[in-house]
Image (spheres, helix red, strand yellow):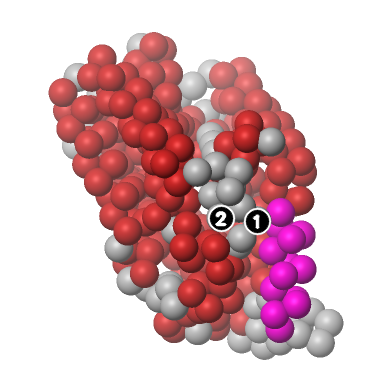
Amino acid sequence: MKALAHLEMTRPYTLFHSGLLAIAGAEVASQGTAAGWRVALAALVTICGWEAGLYAGDYYDRRIDALSKPYRAIPSGRVSAREAFLTMVALIAIGYLSALLLGLPNLALAVLTTALGIAYSKAFKNKALLGNFDRGILGICAVAFGALAGGSLAQWPVVLLAALAFFHDSATNLVGAIRDVEGDRAAGCHTAPAVYGLRAATLIAATLGVLWALCGIGLLALTRPGWLALLLVALALAQAAYVYGALALQAVGVYSIGEHTGVTRAQALQAHKLLVIERLTLLCGIIAIYASVWVALGLLAFTLAATLLAQTTLRDRYDRVEVAESGSRA
């Protein structure tokens, strides 16, 4: 029971995104020449940081979750608050020791990222769009961490990749906030959907989606991508266009689902699931600009398989609970 609770807290369906950001940063910064151990270590550190941030979020949000998501690990009593906090500290320590092997600049960036991650949970999540943008900045940090491990930050392709990460992760996080709006409102948490309304938040997310797509197109224009990179990025763009287009049309009332107008909780849940898959495709496409076809396809196959397995065995189970509880409150 406790092992399952910790597995739920790690959100394995989001596990690989930060690591792929770091790998993409290293590959773009070095034009594919970075040492394999440095790239792998950069991915490990960013994943440790991401997981520490998830534990921090569950620790600092435990009172909010007790009201809106009592089935989660800490509110349900399956993991104590102290245990969650110590796990967060252990993940941070592992990340710092590993970052030190890459150099002092990487360690300094890891420390800054930790501060931003905790700030999201303790302060920025309750500050409307500042919370979503803090998540976007964490995406920049992951790209920069990989770029430092592989080469120089001062390159236009790296800058465009960092901008893509900012807009992309801000948008995805905002969709997640749309999904959680009812519980956040009940708990008095001032997320962007709670403050500005679902329609405005949805249109902002769609706009951020357009901005990251433009950054991705610009990145491809500056590099010399092969067929696989072009194909995967095109697939990701198509996935994103479908998700954000449907959300925007639903938000403005162009069409409705059943008797509902506006974005429903179930639709936001499904959109977020699709975006989790889309970002793996996108990042593996960017990695494929410089990595071999087999490396890029191997990363995509492994991360997609693990993510889909986690979504079907873990996320779908408690997402059904969230939707059911939302319906009972309506």
The residue at which mark 2 appears reads as 75
Numbered mark located on residue 71 in the image: 1
Numbered mark located on residue 32 in the image: none
Q: Say if residue 299 shows up in the picture.
A: yes
Residue 277 higher or lower than 100, as above or below: below
Q: Amino acid at mark 2?
A: Pro
Q: Position of residue 61 (x, y in %)?
A: 44, 58
* Crowd band around label 1 with a 10 angstrom C-alpha radius: few (<14), some (14–19), many (20+): some
Residue 164 vs residue 177: left or right? Answer: left
Residue 315 vs residue 182: left or right? Answer: right
Helix, strand or loop at label 2? It is loop
Residue 60 higher or lower than 49, as above or below: below
Quadrant in which the C terminus appears: bottom right
Quadrant in which the N terminus appears: top right
Residue shown at the point (60%, 43%) measured from the top left:
78
Tell me if residue 187 is in the magenta stretch: no
Q: Nearer the viewer, residue 2 or 136?
A: 2
Q: Amino acid at mark 1?
A: Tyr
Q: Main secondary structure of the magenta part?
A: helix
Q: Position of residue 64 (x, y in %)?
A: 48, 65
Q: Nearer the viewer, residue 317 or 291?
A: 317
Q: Nearer the viewer, residue 10 or 211?
A: 10
